[in-house]
Amino acid sequence: MKIEELSPPERRLWEAFPRGEVVDLSGGDPAFTDPGSWGPERVVRAQVLVALLAGAVEPEPGQVAAVNLTGARIIGHLNLGHASVAVPLTLTDCVFDEAPLLYWASMNTVHLMRCRMPGLNASGARIDGHLWLQGSRITGGLLLDGAHIAGILNMSGVQLANPGGDALLGDRLTVDANVYCDHGFTAHGEVRLPGARVGGQLIFRQAHLHNEGGAALYASRLDVAANVFCDGGFTANGAVRLRGARVGGYLSLVGAKLSHPGDVALNANDLAVETDVYCSDGFTADGSVSFEGARITGQLSLRGARLSNPGETALSLQRLQAEEALLHFAEPIKGVVDLSYARLNLLRDDPKTWPERLQLDGLQYENLDPPMVARDRLAWIRRDRDGYQPQPYERLAQTYRSLGLDADGRTVLLAKARDRRKTQSLPRKIVGWLQDVTVGYGYRPFRAASWLLGLLVFGTVVFSLHRPAILNEDDHPHFNAFFYTLDLLLPIGDLGQERVFAPKGIYQWIANLIVCAGFLLGLTVAAGATRSLSRE
């Protein structure tokens, strides 16, 4: 390209390039009032930029050459596909007639700030510095799949629009430093980051994502070395998918508002987080929130959250592994909370915000806060509407025993036996009812003492009125109805009455009944006394 063929603004850029000087064609007015009305004094052909970036002009000795252009309308194809560019490219407040092509290019730092573009294709590009898109508007899709950015990817305030398609295609994108999608970042269409790797922080603070009926953010297998921020007014109209993602710091969804009614609003299944996850302080989800199989080294906090998915699972923590789960919701959840087979060291909840329905089978925890009395915690267990399962009762009883609350533990196990009885056949229900009435299934052993006392009174009265016959006519010992009945009741020992006197007829049956009852009830009392004097 010859300099004589250049327009005046192109010649200014050509001459400024060897020294990296800024060429400002805005005339002091960078506002995009009507780019179509810009005259030739603000028009630069894309081929001029390509020529400069491809080495058509040598840099001045001691200077850093660069394309640094402001307020221009760029016409034609800016096609740098597969090019090797060693100088920085900085375009500010520029308007592109056609989408720039940087696919599989090897670039230095690229700044396209506050520009308007009908798309940007940088698939597979290698950028040896920063990619700065701050404040730009891109329609038709931003393609960064397979790209590698050695510095920062700055998309603060960027507006992407490709409804029904990919607003951002970042499959397998690698960024060695931070990624900024904040300060009003907006996307109409799907934001895709599956398999992406971020060496610093991923920041979606104050971002607004819209892809109604689909995925607003699809980031399965995302790998972030530090923290992920989806807070500060973050909204997503569509699903947020973080399945299998890994976060080296913490994940913040504080105050985020997610909407995907009747479907999954947040899919964080198999997520791995090195510290904490905050879905708290105004976090709202219209649709289900799922952390199935997630591994969180620290705390999962849902303090002050509002979740709604009526008639379906609103929160699934199935197979979750976490040090602590804080389930202090702002209001009762509308939908089911599934805690089945989760493993927690500490479970904190609030009875005022328990959901109407829980799933607790297989849930493992070491401590509860608040522990509450057994009667109240049993109301929590009985919110599991999937039918009787023994494990939740056993886990709660074990927790009470570990806290030294043996009486509460026995209350839970008694409730377990009673609730199991409801599921049994009629004969077993009858037997179980008798066990409950007499000895509380063995968990109320001192109730047996009351029965022993009642039998002692009964026998004393009966045998006072109907004295048993003497076995040996030559022996005439004194008969005492009280001690005779007590001798029948005691499974061990001899008071000298039972072996001398023998009732007949129905009274023999009464005596045998007292002997059998005394044996069984005596063993129950002894077992209860042993449990009271020892702790597991």
Image (cartoon, rainbow, N blue to C red):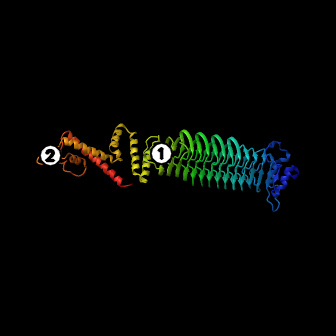
The residue that label 2 is drawn on is 471
Q: Report how far apart the C-alphas of labels 2 and 1 lie in the structure.
A: 62 Å
Mark in the foreground, 2 or 1: 2
Tell me the quarter of the picture where residue 200 sits.
bottom right
Which of the two labelled residues, at mark 2 and mark 1, occupies the earlier sequence position? Answer: 1
**Residue sticking out furthest to the bottom:** 62
The foreground one among 149 and 387 is 387
Where's residue 191, x and y in %?
A: 66, 45
**Residue sticking out furthest to the left:** 474
Position of 51 with respect to 152 (left or right) is right
Amino acid type of the residue that numbered disc 2 sits on in the rendered structure = Leu
Where's residue 423, x and y in %?
A: 40, 39
The foreground one among 232 and 20 is 232
The foreground one among 259 and 224 is 259
The residue that label 1 is drawn on is 360
**Residue sticking out furthest to the top:** 426
Where's residue 509, x and y in %?
A: 22, 41
Position of 141 with respect to 38 (left or right) is left
Position of 312 with respect to 406 (left or right) is right
Q: Residue at x 51, y 44 (%)?
A: 352
Numbered disc 2: secondary structure: loop
Determine which of the numbered discs, if any, sits on residue 86 in the image: none
Where's residue 486, x and y in %?
A: 23, 48
Q: Is residue 513 visible?
A: no
Q: Is residue 426 visible?
A: yes
Query: Which quarter shows the C terminus?
Result: bottom left
Amino acid type of the residue that numbered disc 1 sits on in the rendered structure = Leu
Numbered disc 1: secondary structure: loop
Q: Residue at x 26, y 44 (%)?
A: 455
